[in-house]
Amino acid sequence: MRAKLLIVSTLLACVCAGRADVLDETADTQTALDDLALSAVGKHWNIQTAAPPLSALGQFSSQLQSPEAKALWTKDLAELNSAGDSPGAAAAVGKLEGTLQQVLALEMLAAWQSGNLEATREWRASIKLPKHASAVEGLLALQRIGGAADQRAEVARMLARETLVWQGSRARERADDLLRLAKADRATPELVALRASEINALTQFPPALLSAAKVPGQPAAIPVPADTEEAIAQWKLTLESQLPDLLTADDVDRQERLVVKLLRLVPMEYRAGVRDGQIVVPLEYREAVSFTVQAEQILVELRPNWLKTKGEALKKYGADLENGLATLEETIASKGDILIIDKTCKDLSALLQDRFGISLRKAGKGSDVVQETALEIRSLLSQSLQAAHAGNWRQANDLRLEAYTTFDLEIEARVLPRDPDLATRAERSFLDGSAAGPGIKAALDQRAKGEVLDNTYARTLKALDESVALLRVGLSPTTVSITAFTIVLREGLEAVVILAALLAGLRGPENAASRRQVGLGAWAAIAVSAITFILARTVIQSLSRYGETLEAVISILAVIILLIVTNWVFHKFYWTGWNARLRELKDKAATQRGQQWESLAMCGVGFLTIYREGFETTLFMQSLILEGGFTASLIGLFAGLAVIGLAGWAIFTWGMKLPYRKLLVWTGVLVVTILATFLGSTVRLFQTIGWMPIHPIRGLEIPTWMGTWLGIYPSWEGLVIPLLGFAYVGGAWLFVRWQGLRKQAAFEAMVQSRRESPRPTANTGA
């Protein structure tokens, strides 16, 4: 997580006004429960003196909108009202403590299912979080997705599962506290009744919550134990063994690897962020804190699974894990010695690998690896920042490029169809930046230092967190198909426009060969794109880190071919054709060489036009298949291809019926526009992979669609170089026209001189 306090405070500020009532009512209810708990545990229970707090508890029910929540609260409140003695009252108060958290969760789900996003946030913010829990990702997901109807079930599942983790973790915390009290001989019958009843209520998940989370079963209520250490320890063990395991086998593998990786990264971040007990790089220190908390949270989520699969190891070494993490947290908080942190992390890593059998071998698929990928990106960016602070600018940029390539292939490809603005903002944070400040590439090119450099990396990490939060919500099959359809449509239309611009101007039998050459190149590209798609999960995946470079090479070739074609268009159609006699004066060998280059250009533009888009579509589709499934992705793929085919047929058919002269004009305009678009996109790729510097234009905001469709990006290079393409076209136009006028003038002068020269007279000698 990045800058959690800043993110949460920013998001809370957006909704604080509407949230006040629910938060205040919940706080008043909790205060009333605390007062009643003190009376019951202190053996001062009296129904008359308890009347005011009981009245406050009754008023809370008026805030409830969910029938299930209201029924649950009313039933447990009735038990408290009928309590006759302190132990009974303690049990009833404790039960109501746990029930309050379940009621808040039910209200949150009901608000979400009714489409009330604001109320969903309010109720969710009222739930008590256990130690090490993070509410940032869920909050960011709600912010990014909003009330999207097609994602409602998936968001409900995320919220419900998140709540189950919180309630289970809080129950374990309460059980640990109770066991410590028993060991200290401070566990009275009333206190045991209070805490055990609360814990039971926390683990008695309402059916609506389990249904939304798609978790079967329900833990059984365990009778309140006796107030002895042995009885409470056994009760705690039974309770934990019944908690639902929310992780799949792939989830467990991924989370276990994450813990070890996090523990390896903590000393690196801390060493870069703290010197002699003082924070020198706040960003790095916050990462050390964040990674530690994240490791603790993951171990809490793994515990139910480990109780079933690694019970002996957990029994023997569970306390060592907890104590080591506590030492790590305390040392970081006190800005302690790096040697202690380094040794603690190494000991914990060795313990996890040797005693719990954790392997760092990467597994999992689709969205399962998003969090792990994000961690790798954070690590690379952290190393890049350290290199930049040390003045190693080339190393910093290499690490930045590796981080961006990983982001582009694994995360941006998934975010782009869901939220193009977020994907573009995240991408720009790696490159030129925005009005908020320069991107990492621009900052490195400018040799930025100090706070400016730190803030640049912080913006990228924040965008990364938002992207991960968005991807935590799974895609429905319908959304997968629509996303695939959108990708194919966007990439395919550009290819159709280019081919239409060329083929529409190649009418007539004299251009039949050129049409065949373009078509041959296009069909070859379709075949190669299909092969690329098939190989994408094997050969291409091994080259994934070079995806941007490969695309840049293809773009270079496409630009070269378009330059040839642009020049050919002007020669072929606009000027050489207006005087047939000039063609007779051409040198035969030069004509033959021109035809060879023309054939190569026609095949090349047909191939590269299709394959450039096919290559990019393949990368997008592979990520989508991993995340959303093969069948739904193929439905969208074939639907998009069908629409592209119809669009191409309509364009080519109607284009053949357009007036020839107007068609030539539009052909020229389209070719020139496409040339500028390719130039802009190629410049962007060059900047991405570090082949070209980037100088952003401050204050200039360009809509996402202009970059996608027109290749226009807000940097000096991104605007000036495409204009050079127009200059080339204009210069070619003037040159060709000048040549044509010159040859025409020469030809007319030759004709005129022949007309004016006297004819020779016949010899009539004697």
Image (spheres, helix red, strand yellow):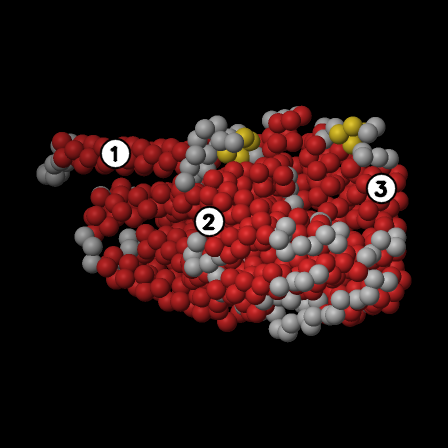
Q: Residues within 10 Å of mark 3 (few under 14, many from 20)?
A: many
Q: How far across and down, in percent of the image, does residue 287 sit?
A: 71, 40
Location of the N terminus by quadrant is top right
Inspect this view and state whether residue 183 appears.
yes
Q: Which residue is mark 1?
A: 741
Q: Earlier in the sequence, mark 3 or mark 1?
A: 3
Q: Nearer the viewer, mark 3 or mark 2?
A: 2
**Vertical comparison of 327 with 335: above or below:** below
Q: Amino acid at mark 2?
A: Glu
Q: Please report the residue visible at 56 percent of the width from the left and 56 percent of the height from the top.
A: 104
Front residue of 744/736: it is 736
**Vertical comparison of 212 with 691: above or below:** below
Q: Earlier in the sequence, mark 3 or mark 2?
A: 2
Q: Amino acid at mark 1?
A: Leu
Q: Which residue is mark 3?
A: 341
Q: Amino acid at mark 3?
A: Ile
- What is the secondary structure assignment of the residue under circle 1? helix
Q: Please report the residue visible at 86 percent of the width from the left and 35 percent of the height from the top.
A: 337
Q: How far across and down, in percent of the image, does residue 529 sit?
A: 50, 62
Q: Which residue is mark 2?
A: 118
Q: How far across and down, in percent of the image, does residue 728 sit?
A: 39, 35
Disc on res. 74: none
